[in-house]
Amino acid sequence: MVGGFPVLLKKIYYKAGLRSEWFFYFASGFFFALAGIAAAKIIFAQNIGMMAVFLAALASIPLVDSKISLSEIVLGRTKRISNRLIWLDEIVTTEHKVTFKSIIHDHKNLFATYLAVFLGAMLCFSTVTLALPQNQVEIIFGEQFRVISGNALNPLGVFTEIIFNNFFVLAISFLLALMLEKGTTFIMVWNASVWGAAFAAAAKSPFISLAQDPIASFTLIMLVVFPHLVLEAGAYFLSTIAGGLLNKAIIAENINSARFRVIATHSAFLLLLGLILLGAGAIIETVVIGAIA
């Protein structure tokens, strides 16, 4: 039933005349997070924050998993051909040459899907945090604030600590995607909930809030953190895609086949690119924290 609803939602979206796929996934991330928070508050009043993440991730899985399944199916089998008037995907052999350009082309749509769902969910958690009184927010997002108080907003963080923490999350994302076919969406929504609650809570803080205007403060915070946020989140998404592709290849392909080698090469390249983004994000985050501190 959960799998059928996102498909129905997508059909309604397109029948309404809307065509932006990125906005569909962004709106879906927001809507599923909001529905997850509402359902968790009604059914799981003792642990709303964690159950909201679980329910939002459960609703998002069909959308994200269908995209990664499609990527695995066509990987190494298609090649883009074009002239001034048309663009077509041609079926080719599994001896598809893997280049950095081909990897970007093959996975940019999947990456955009992860980013859209993540940003939509994060904005939802931020909106709820901004809208509700602080005492209610602390009850709803108790688990998220325990993480925040531990390290997410630590002004004394240094580069080595940041890179170690981020590398740990990246490794967990890759391993979860590799071992648990559906588990990575939970990690994505969990990160969205922690960061969404963190930035909104900071905006409501009397030490940061601009003229008692949390929305203006939140906007300013997002402008400051957005570069490293996208790099860091992007690193996690790439590691998740790498693990997810390899998981599906192990299940569907012969390990000695040319297609498996193509997919494994893509997975290794994506993981390496994720590490590069992680390092760049950590450098920017260190600079931002140093400027604030």
Image (cartoon, rainbow, N blue to C red):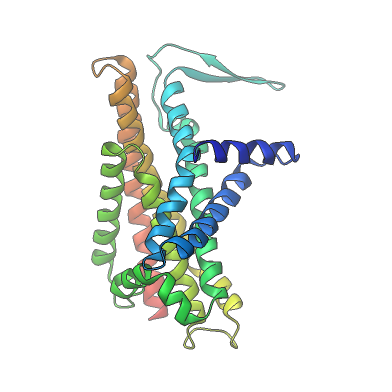
Q: Please, which residue is most extreme toward the front here?
A: 43
| 106 and 188: which is toward the camera | 188
- Mark count: 0
- Residue drawn at the location 40% of the way across and 64% of the way down: 49
Residue 158: name its quadrant.
bottom left
The answer to whether residue 191 is seen in the rendering is: no
Residue 141: name its quadrant.
bottom left
Residue 109: x and y in percent read 52, 37
Task: Report the side of 254 relative to 68 (left or right).
Answer: left
Residue 293: name its quadrant.
bottom left
The answer to whether residue 259 is seen in the rendering is: yes
Residue 99: x and y in percent read 40, 28
Residue 160: x and y in percent read 24, 64
| 256 and 247: which is toward the camera | 247
Above or below, comparing residue 245 to residue 218 in the picture = above
- Residue drawn at the location 45% of the way across and 17% of the way down: 77
| 34 and 206: which is toward the camera | 34
Above or below, comparing residue 105 to residue 225 in the picture = above
Residue 79: x and y in percent read 51, 19
